[in-house]
Amino acid sequence: MAEFIIKRILQAILVLLVMTVLVFFGVNVVGNPVYIFASSECDQPCLTKIIADLGLDKPVWEQYLVFLGNLLQGDLGNSFTHGVPTLTLILERLPATLELAFAALVIALVVGLPLGMLAGLRPHAISSRFIMGFSMVGFSLPVFWIGLIMILIFSVQLGWMPSIGRGDTIPMLGTDVSLFTLDGLHHLAMPAFTLSLIMMAMVIRLTRAGMREVMFADYIRFARANGIRERRILSVHVLKNILIPIVTVLGMEFGGVIAFAVVVESIFSWPGVGKMLIDAIGVLDRPLIVAYLIFVVFMFVVLNLLVDVLYSVLDPRVRLGGKE
Amino acid sequence: MTDAPPVLEVDTLCTSFMTAGGEIKALRDVSFSVSRGEILGLVGESGSGKSLTGFSINGLLSPPGEVVGGHIRLHGQDISTLSAEQMRQLRGRRIAMIFQDPMMTLNPVLRIETQMRDALRAHETLTKAEARMRALEALDEVGIPAPAERLRNYPHQLSGGMRQRVAIAIALLHKPDLIIADEPTTALDVTIQGQILALAQTLCKERGTALIWITHDLAVVAGIADRIAVMYAGRVVEIGDVDALLDDPAHPYTAGLIGSVPARGNRGTPLRQIPGRMPALTDLPPGCAFAPRCDFATAACNSPPPMVGSGRAVRCIHPLTEVAR
Amino acid sequence: MPVAGSPRDLWRRFLQSSIAVVALIVFLTFCVLGFGAPFIAPQNPYDLAQVDILDSLLPPGSVSFTGMTYWLGTDGQGRDMLSAMLYGIRISLIVGLLSGFLALLLGTAVGLIAAYKRGWVDTVLMRIVDLQLSFPTILVALILLVILGRGVDKIIFALVVVQWAYFARTVRGVALVEGAREYVEAARGLRLGGVRILLGHILPNCLPTMLVVATMQMAAAISLEATLSFLGLGLPPTRPSLGLLIANGFDYLQSGRYWISVLPGLVLLAIIISANVLGDRMRDVLNPRL
């Protein structure tokens, strides 16, 4: 297993390297790079100074190495609008986004798994068709639209939920967490639910498909032949087999969820990195934008790695190798 | 064989598939019995209905299949009318089953210990430690070395023969009255096959468990069975003691089966093949299903032949030998 | 791959699902509305001469100073919502269809080449495809649009970049299967040129798959474009798609002026869902190996 993990880590590093190259050269090739580091009010002498400061008069590959060097030291540049290192800003606001994504994941699983299992058990019942229809709708709807409607119904019309911001937090693990306060949950509910819908739709479909496949497997028949109760068969014998593809796909899609968090944070004014990005785009705070992109790619690659490890934990065939 | 009352009595069992296109009669008037400690070989080619018979007995027919007629009696008690929960309580405890491919039979993501514990807890309340003890004993009985280690393994870490032994061990956990083994050695190497056969035979004789050994391979079952029932197109066409049946088959199909098996006796002579093939269940002839392929068929064979005889019986109006009445 | 049935049979099977028929009608209706927008919209909302700011934020059904009925109300600038939505449908559809089509061309070309050439060409191309597919679409589109700025051509470009890889992967899969069939062996034996085999034999059998993928991708593209527009990327404010309309109206939600956001939202929903239903149904009917 160690060999497997090491191989995956090396692959991840390679991908990261490639991404830094892409981002750097993409930025340099397409636009005048000096504007990445200059605010829009800079005039000619100011620009010249920046060019010299940043070594933009040096050859491109040398610039890349400087860029990479800074990156490895954790220096992603300073934000215009806030005047502090971008990395600091990102790390400050990251917990809120992670909290949101985590809550969305939990909701997707807790609601999606049972619904999917139900749809898989009785594929032709009306309830199953309804569930599948719901999953198709959840899959098609653009995230921002869902958020919109939820605000309209639950905030404006019914006044049940607040539509803006994050609730009260308590310090935990070195940062602020709002999961454990009632007010926090109140604020978290709608954004998390909105974000969860894509994943939920996917979980429902995958669970249902997995059920259809696993329920007819020989080992389930064997379990029945031994007289094991149906409930136990479903909750352990079937579920553990279904989870493997679900975890894989969820892991692959989770990166997309982080990306979609941008939209959700924007709608609900949730103070995470996504909202930070949108604000930065609005005022053209380029260093912040670039820093965000690189950071997200990094997180994404790490995430994929974690999913691979998790997969090997769940599927003993991958972890231990076969004898045959 | 012995005078003990039969463990299992299957009496004119009829199983059908209720499909959108109509009723497909898969099993028709299947009757046989198995006594304590007796091994019955249920022989037939694919599609003859032998596996379905097994599933009909322990209530594991997948829809749209269902038992539509006849009775199944376990120790005299009619089990064909039991509720689903009552059948569940029988399964594993009094009627056990072993399947063909042990790789597919054991759950790939659960440890052996977990699967055995689940099988135990299906019918008894046990602590983890107690279940572990029972599991170790069971693995020991089927001759698995280093059982403690095996418990922690996953199925893919064991060899094919070992997996089948585990399946047998699970089947024996509650000391069932009857074991239905559906082609248990078909997927195994010949040498392993021999070991499993010997194991099954010993266990049955020692414990008095009744065993139905379902197979398409006459040669395999000839060495182990006490009695043989031959199935064709959903019906039992001949049944009797193994020696009498093999030396002196009454049904032309049985004779054909025996003749097509290479054995020391017919070395050098060309193997006889039965011409044609078994009819599909949707396309059965009105009378004897074997008639189209039979050398001895006459017009009378167009009506369903009755089962003649008891103990040794044959469903044929032109049997090759007269069976004792 | 030989599809089970003639076009007429397939069409008839397609029609058996009433939901799919409804979806088809809905989608075609929107296509007609969208492309006919310049002719049927009561007002050209981007012609400043026709827009009166005093008429802003009127609820649906209000009548303007000049006697024109604002059937669906007006937005913050006084633009007629009905007209704005018709133009919005137009842009959304154009962007979605065009980007989908271009991605189809590019992806199919790459997939066919990879399947036909095999060897290292195949490996390299598929590695690129895998890399592209392993990143979430919205992230890639975001990066591209941040770098490129706003504009219709830019968002089409971004959408093509995001979509082509999926086409490439699926077409390659089908082409590989087709390429292994006997008729291709026969054609190679007859020394028919590679391009001719590709275009004349393999490609036609890939069409069912491509059609299904294209439909579902189009729905995704429209959705993605709407999301990007909502975030203020991609389309310029002078050419708002439905997404941008929704974004513009977002601020008025709290004050109860729902029509500016919700109505375009409903239309967007209808388009996306009908496209997805169509794709689903086509997949059932054509049953391609996806």
Image: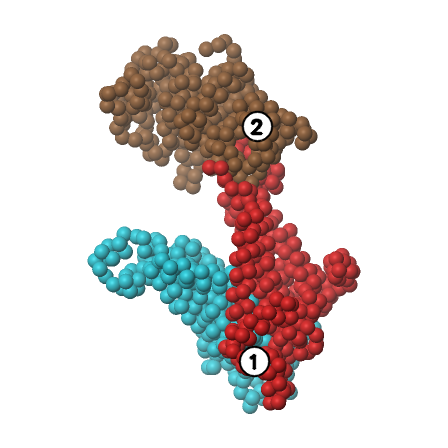
Chain colours: A red, B brown, C cyan
Q: Residues within 10 Å of mark 1 (few under 14, many from 20)?
A: some
C138 versus A114 height, above or below: below
Q: Which chain hosts label 2?
A: B
A18 versus B151 height, above or below: below
Q: Nearer the viewer, mark 1 or mark 2?
A: 1
Q: How many marks?
A: 2
| Residue at x-position 78% and y-position 60% | A170
**Residue B27 at x, y percent in the picture:** 42, 28
Q: Which residue is mark 1?
A: A56
Q: Nearer the viewer, residue C60 or B91?
A: B91
Label drawn at residue B146: 2
Q: Quadrant of residue B213?
A: top left
Amino acid beneath label 1: Leu
* SS of the residue under disc 1: loop
**Residue B180 at x, y percent in the picture:** 49, 25
Q: Determine whether, in the image, residue B215 is placed left or right of residue A32.
A: left
**Residue C39 at x, y percent in the picture:** 46, 81
A210 versus C172 height, above or below: above
Q: Residues within 10 Å of mark 2 (few under 14, many from 20)?
A: few
Q: Taking the image as drawn, is residue A241 in sight? A: no
Amino acid beneath label 2: Ala
Q: Which chain hosts label 1?
A: A
* SS of the residue under disc 2: loop
Q: Gap in Å between the C-alphas at discs 1 and 2?
A: 70 Å
Label drawn at residue A165: none
